Image: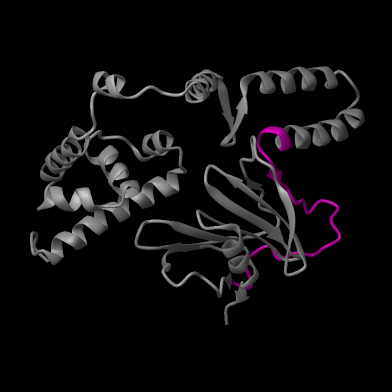
Amino acid sequence: MSNEILKRAFIEAYERKFSNIPSDEEIAKTHTFSNKFESRMRKLQKKSKIKYVYIFNIQFRRAAVMAVCVLIMFTASLSIEAVRTPIFNFCVSVYEKFSSVFFVSDEGGELSAPTTLEVLYSPDNIPDDYILIEEITDIVSRILIYANADGDEVEFQQNILSIRMIIDTEGVTTEEILINANEGIFFSNKGINNILWYDNQYSYIVKGSIDKNSLLRIAESIKAEK
Amino acid sequence: MIVDEILNLPEIYADAVYLDCVMGMKINEIAKELSISTETAKKRVQRGRNLLKEKLKKEAMIDV
Protein backbone atom coordinates (compact mmCIF):
# COMPACT_ATOMS: atom_id res chain seq x y z
CA MET A 1 0.00 0.00 0.00
CA SER A 2 1.64 3.21 -1.09
CA ASN A 3 2.04 6.22 1.15
CA GLU A 4 -0.06 8.23 -1.27
CA ILE A 5 -3.03 5.87 -0.93
CA LEU A 6 -2.68 5.90 2.86
CA LYS A 7 -2.49 9.69 2.88
CA ARG A 8 -5.65 10.05 0.79
CA ALA A 9 -7.43 7.52 2.98
CA PHE A 10 -6.46 9.42 6.14
CA ILE A 11 -7.63 12.72 4.67
CA GLU A 12 -10.98 11.19 3.76
CA ALA A 13 -11.32 9.51 7.14
CA TYR A 14 -10.64 12.69 9.09
CA GLU A 15 -12.92 14.76 6.86
CA ARG A 16 -15.66 12.25 7.54
CA LYS A 17 -14.85 12.31 11.26
CA PHE A 18 -15.00 16.08 11.57
CA SER A 19 -17.96 16.60 9.25
CA ASN A 20 -20.25 15.60 12.11
CA ILE A 21 -18.99 18.41 14.32
CA PRO A 22 -21.27 21.48 14.11
CA SER A 23 -19.75 24.84 13.21
CA ASP A 24 -19.03 27.50 15.81
CA GLU A 25 -22.06 29.47 14.66
CA GLU A 26 -24.36 26.49 15.10
CA ILE A 27 -22.93 25.74 18.53
CA ALA A 28 -23.33 29.38 19.59
CA LYS A 29 -27.02 29.25 18.68
CA THR A 30 -27.79 26.27 20.88
CA HIS A 31 -25.25 26.38 23.70
CA THR A 32 -23.97 28.95 26.16
CA PHE A 33 -20.87 28.14 28.16
CA SER A 34 -21.03 28.71 31.90
CA ASN A 35 -19.09 31.55 33.53
CA LYS A 36 -16.90 28.99 35.29
CA PHE A 37 -16.00 27.36 31.97
CA GLU A 38 -15.28 30.72 30.35
CA SER A 39 -13.06 31.65 33.29
CA ARG A 40 -11.12 28.37 33.04
CA MET A 41 -10.63 28.88 29.32
CA ARG A 42 -9.27 32.39 29.90
CA LYS A 43 -6.81 30.99 32.48
CA LEU A 44 -5.68 28.30 30.04
CA GLN A 45 -5.16 30.88 27.32
CA LYS A 46 -3.19 33.02 29.72
CA LYS A 47 -1.08 30.04 30.79
CA SER A 48 -0.34 29.18 27.16
CA LYS A 49 1.32 32.55 26.77
CA ILE A 50 3.88 31.82 29.51
CA LYS A 51 7.30 31.45 27.92
CA TYR A 52 9.22 28.28 28.69
CA VAL A 53 12.75 27.20 27.95
CA TYR A 54 13.97 23.62 27.70
CA ILE A 55 17.17 22.61 29.44
CA PHE A 56 18.12 18.92 29.27
CA ASN A 57 14.52 18.26 28.24
CA ILE A 58 13.18 19.85 31.44
CA GLN A 59 10.65 22.60 31.03
CA PHE A 60 11.35 25.73 33.09
CA ARG A 61 9.60 29.06 33.14
CA ARG A 62 11.76 31.69 31.53
CA ALA A 63 11.50 33.90 34.62
CA ALA A 64 12.78 31.05 36.80
CA VAL A 65 15.73 30.43 34.48
CA MET A 66 16.59 34.14 34.62
CA ALA A 67 16.43 34.03 38.41
CA VAL A 68 18.79 31.05 38.51
CA CYS A 69 21.21 32.81 36.12
CA VAL A 70 21.24 35.90 38.33
CA LEU A 71 21.91 33.76 41.39
CA ILE A 72 24.73 31.86 39.68
CA MET A 73 26.32 35.13 38.54
CA PHE A 74 26.06 36.52 42.04
CA THR A 75 27.50 33.46 43.77
CA ALA A 76 30.25 33.15 41.17
CA SER A 77 31.74 36.24 42.70
CA LEU A 78 32.24 34.26 45.93
CA SER A 79 35.01 31.72 46.53
CA ILE A 80 34.67 28.35 44.80
CA GLU A 81 34.17 26.55 48.08
CA ALA A 82 31.35 28.92 49.03
CA VAL A 83 29.65 28.49 45.66
CA ARG A 84 29.63 24.72 45.39
CA THR A 85 27.21 23.73 48.14
CA PRO A 86 24.64 26.60 47.74
CA ILE A 87 24.21 26.00 43.99
CA PHE A 88 23.67 22.26 44.45
CA ASN A 89 21.06 22.80 47.15
CA PHE A 90 19.39 25.66 45.27
CA CYS A 91 19.11 23.72 42.03
CA VAL A 92 17.37 20.95 43.88
CA SER A 93 14.90 23.48 45.29
CA VAL A 94 14.12 24.87 41.85
CA TYR A 95 13.61 21.37 40.46
CA GLU A 96 11.20 20.53 43.18
CA LYS A 97 9.11 23.57 42.35
CA PHE A 98 8.93 23.18 38.59
CA SER A 99 10.31 19.78 37.69
CA SER A 100 11.37 17.33 40.32
CA VAL A 101 14.71 15.56 39.76
CA PHE A 102 15.09 12.26 41.47
CA PHE A 103 18.85 12.41 41.85
CA VAL A 104 20.91 9.69 43.43
CA SER A 105 24.64 10.33 43.42
CA ASP A 106 27.44 7.90 43.89
CA GLU A 107 29.76 10.67 45.01
CA GLY A 108 30.46 10.12 48.63
CA GLY A 109 27.79 7.47 48.77
CA GLU A 110 28.21 4.60 51.15
CA LEU A 111 26.29 2.05 49.03
CA SER A 112 28.01 0.06 46.37
CA ALA A 113 25.36 -0.16 43.69
CA PRO A 114 25.63 -2.06 40.41
CA THR A 115 26.76 0.02 37.45
CA THR A 116 24.96 -2.27 35.00
CA LEU A 117 21.68 -4.20 35.15
CA GLU A 118 23.03 -7.39 36.66
CA VAL A 119 19.56 -8.63 37.55
CA LEU A 120 16.50 -7.91 35.42
CA TYR A 121 13.22 -7.23 37.17
CA SER A 122 9.71 -7.31 35.76
CA PRO A 123 6.23 -6.97 37.23
CA ASP A 124 4.48 -10.20 38.04
CA ASN A 125 0.99 -8.78 38.43
CA ILE A 126 -0.20 -6.97 35.30
CA PRO A 127 -3.97 -6.56 34.66
CA ASP A 128 -5.31 -9.45 32.59
CA ASP A 129 -6.27 -7.36 29.58
CA TYR A 130 -2.77 -5.93 29.17
CA ILE A 131 -0.08 -7.63 27.11
CA LEU A 132 3.61 -6.88 26.74
CA ILE A 133 4.06 -4.99 23.50
CA GLU A 134 7.55 -3.62 23.74
CA GLU A 135 10.78 -4.28 25.62
CA ILE A 136 13.83 -2.07 25.46
CA THR A 137 16.71 -3.37 27.53
CA ASP A 138 20.30 -2.20 27.59
CA ILE A 139 23.08 -2.50 30.14
CA VAL A 140 21.91 0.38 32.33
CA SER A 141 18.15 0.60 31.88
CA ARG A 142 15.10 -1.38 30.97
CA ILE A 143 11.66 -0.36 29.74
CA LEU A 144 8.70 -2.72 29.48
CA ILE A 145 5.51 -1.43 27.90
CA TYR A 146 2.18 -3.17 28.31
CA ALA A 147 -1.00 -2.16 26.45
CA ASN A 148 -4.62 -3.20 26.24
CA ALA A 149 -6.91 -3.28 23.23
CA ASP A 150 -7.93 0.35 23.78
CA GLY A 151 -4.36 1.54 23.50
CA ASP A 152 -3.99 2.30 27.23
CA GLU A 153 -0.43 1.67 28.34
CA VAL A 154 1.40 0.75 31.51
CA GLU A 155 5.15 1.28 31.54
CA PHE A 156 7.74 -0.25 33.86
CA GLN A 157 11.30 1.06 34.06
CA GLN A 158 14.35 -0.26 35.87
CA ASN A 159 17.50 1.90 35.99
CA ILE A 160 20.89 1.80 37.64
CA LEU A 161 21.07 4.24 40.53
CA SER A 162 23.49 6.66 38.89
CA ILE A 163 20.97 7.49 36.15
CA ARG A 164 19.06 10.69 36.87
CA MET A 165 15.28 10.30 36.43
CA ILE A 166 13.63 13.43 35.12
CA ILE A 167 10.01 13.80 36.14
CA ASP A 168 7.57 16.66 35.67
CA THR A 169 5.77 17.43 38.91
CA GLU A 170 4.79 21.02 38.14
CA GLY A 171 1.53 21.80 39.90
CA VAL A 172 1.07 18.31 41.36
CA THR A 173 1.33 16.92 44.86
CA THR A 174 3.71 14.07 45.55
CA GLU A 175 2.91 11.48 48.19
CA GLU A 176 5.61 9.50 49.95
CA ILE A 177 4.94 5.78 49.86
CA LEU A 178 6.68 2.49 50.56
CA ILE A 179 7.04 -0.24 47.96
CA ASN A 180 8.06 -3.47 49.66
CA ALA A 181 9.64 -1.37 52.46
CA ASN A 182 11.54 0.80 49.95
CA GLU A 183 11.06 4.56 49.81
CA GLY A 184 9.19 6.00 46.87
CA ILE A 185 6.78 8.66 45.74
CA PHE A 186 3.41 8.62 44.05
CA PHE A 187 1.96 11.43 41.98
CA SER A 188 -0.60 11.95 39.27
CA ASN A 189 -0.02 14.27 36.33
CA LYS A 190 -2.13 14.85 33.22
CA GLY A 191 -4.17 11.73 33.82
CA ILE A 192 -1.15 9.48 34.29
CA ASN A 193 -0.40 7.92 37.68
CA ASN A 194 3.28 7.51 38.53
CA ILE A 195 5.18 5.57 41.16
CA LEU A 196 8.94 5.96 41.58
CA TRP A 197 10.98 4.07 44.12
CA TYR A 198 14.42 2.66 44.68
CA ASP A 199 16.30 0.04 46.66
CA ASN A 200 20.02 -0.27 47.29
CA GLN A 201 20.61 -1.57 43.78
CA TYR A 202 18.28 0.06 41.25
CA SER A 203 15.56 2.65 40.76
CA TYR A 204 12.15 1.82 39.32
CA ILE A 205 9.18 3.57 37.73
CA VAL A 206 5.69 2.28 37.05
CA LYS A 207 3.27 4.59 35.31
CA GLY A 208 0.02 4.47 33.40
CA SER A 209 -3.54 5.67 33.16
CA ILE A 210 -4.82 2.95 35.49
CA ASP A 211 -5.90 3.65 39.09
CA LYS A 212 -3.44 4.09 41.94
CA ASN A 213 -4.20 0.81 43.71
CA SER A 214 -3.69 -1.21 40.54
CA LEU A 215 -0.43 0.60 39.95
CA LEU A 216 0.67 -0.14 43.53
CA ARG A 217 -0.05 -3.83 43.04
CA ILE A 218 2.06 -3.83 39.89
CA ALA A 219 4.93 -2.03 41.65
CA GLU A 220 4.85 -4.41 44.60
CA SER A 221 4.85 -7.46 42.36
CA ILE A 222 8.20 -6.93 40.67
CA LYS A 223 10.44 -9.95 40.74
CA ALA A 224 13.86 -10.86 39.50
CA GLU A 225 13.82 -12.79 36.25
CA LYS A 226 15.63 -16.09 36.21
CA MET B 1 -12.30 -0.30 3.40
CA ILE B 2 -9.15 1.53 4.42
CA VAL B 3 -11.08 4.61 5.51
CA ASP B 4 -13.31 2.54 7.82
CA GLU B 5 -10.30 0.83 9.39
CA ILE B 6 -8.65 4.22 9.98
CA LEU B 7 -11.82 5.43 11.71
CA ASN B 8 -11.73 2.32 13.92
CA LEU B 9 -8.10 2.81 14.95
CA PRO B 10 -7.57 3.99 18.55
CA GLU B 11 -7.32 7.74 18.39
CA ILE B 12 -3.83 7.92 19.89
CA TYR B 13 -2.45 5.85 17.02
CA ALA B 14 -4.59 7.39 14.29
CA ASP B 15 -3.55 10.92 15.25
CA ALA B 16 0.13 10.00 15.29
CA VAL B 17 -0.04 8.34 11.86
CA TYR B 18 -2.08 11.27 10.51
CA LEU B 19 0.60 13.74 11.58
CA ASP B 20 3.28 11.51 10.06
CA CYS B 21 1.55 10.55 6.84
CA VAL B 22 -0.65 13.53 5.96
CA MET B 23 1.13 16.44 7.61
CA GLY B 24 4.59 15.03 6.89
CA MET B 25 5.84 15.86 10.38
CA LYS B 26 9.06 14.47 11.76
CA ILE B 27 8.96 12.36 14.90
CA ASN B 28 10.21 15.14 17.19
CA GLU B 29 7.57 17.48 15.72
CA ILE B 30 4.86 14.88 16.32
CA ALA B 31 6.11 14.45 19.89
CA LYS B 32 5.90 18.19 20.52
CA GLU B 33 2.45 18.45 18.93
CA LEU B 34 1.06 15.62 21.04
CA SER B 35 3.05 16.55 24.18
CA ILE B 36 4.71 13.16 24.39
CA SER B 37 8.30 11.94 24.26
CA THR B 38 9.96 11.27 20.90
CA GLU B 39 10.25 7.60 21.78
CA THR B 40 6.51 7.38 22.46
CA ALA B 41 5.73 9.28 19.27
CA LYS B 42 7.86 6.88 17.26
CA LYS B 43 6.19 3.88 18.88
CA ARG B 44 2.70 5.25 18.26
CA VAL B 45 3.40 5.84 14.59
CA GLN B 46 4.87 2.37 14.19
CA ARG B 47 2.07 0.69 16.10
CA GLY B 48 -0.59 2.65 14.28
CA ARG B 49 0.79 1.59 10.94
CA ASN B 50 1.19 -2.01 12.07
CA LEU B 51 -2.35 -2.17 13.47
CA LEU B 52 -3.75 -0.81 10.23
CA LYS B 53 -1.69 -3.25 8.22
CA GLU B 54 -2.91 -6.20 10.29
CA LYS B 55 -6.54 -5.14 10.00
CA LEU B 56 -6.25 -4.76 6.27
CA LYS B 57 -4.48 -8.08 5.93
CA LYS B 58 -7.41 -9.73 7.68
CA GLU B 59 -9.71 -8.21 5.12
CA ALA B 60 -7.33 -9.38 2.38
CA MET B 61 -7.10 -5.81 1.09
CA ILE B 62 -3.32 -5.97 0.69
CA ASP B 63 -0.87 -8.66 -0.19
CA VAL B 64 0.45 -10.79 2.63
Q: Main secondary structure of the magenta part?
A: loop
Quadrant of the image containing the C terminus of chain A = bottom right
Q: How many marks?
A: 0
Residue at 15% x, 51% y is B4
Q: Nearer the viewer, residue A25 or A12?
A: A25
Q: Would you place residue A83 above or below residue A112 in this image?
A: above
Residue at 8% x, 64% y is B60
| x and y, in percent, of residue A118 in the image | 64, 71
| x and y, in percent, of residue A89 in the image | 83, 36
Is B25 on the left-hand or right-hand side of B59? right
| The quarter of the displayed image where residue A50 is located | top right
Is A158 in the magenta?
A: no
Residue at 55% x, 73% y is A125
Range of magenta residues: A96-120
| The quarter of the displayed image where residue A85 is located | top right
Is B41 on the left-hand or right-hand side of A180? left
Q: Would you place residue A198 above or below residue A7 in this image?
A: below
Q: Residue furthest bottom?
A: A226
Is A28 on the left-hand or right-hand side of A211? left
Q: Would you place residue A90 above or below residue A111 in this image?
A: above
| x and y, in percent, of residue A84 in the image | 85, 33
Q: Nearer the viewer, residue A93 or A221?
A: A221
Is A180 on the left-hand or right-hand side of A141? right
> Which of the colour schemes (rainbow, by chain, secondary structure, one colour) is used?
one colour
Q: Nearer the viewer, residue A142 or A131?
A: A131
Is A102 in the magenta?
A: yes
| x and y, in percent, of residue A199 in the image | 74, 64
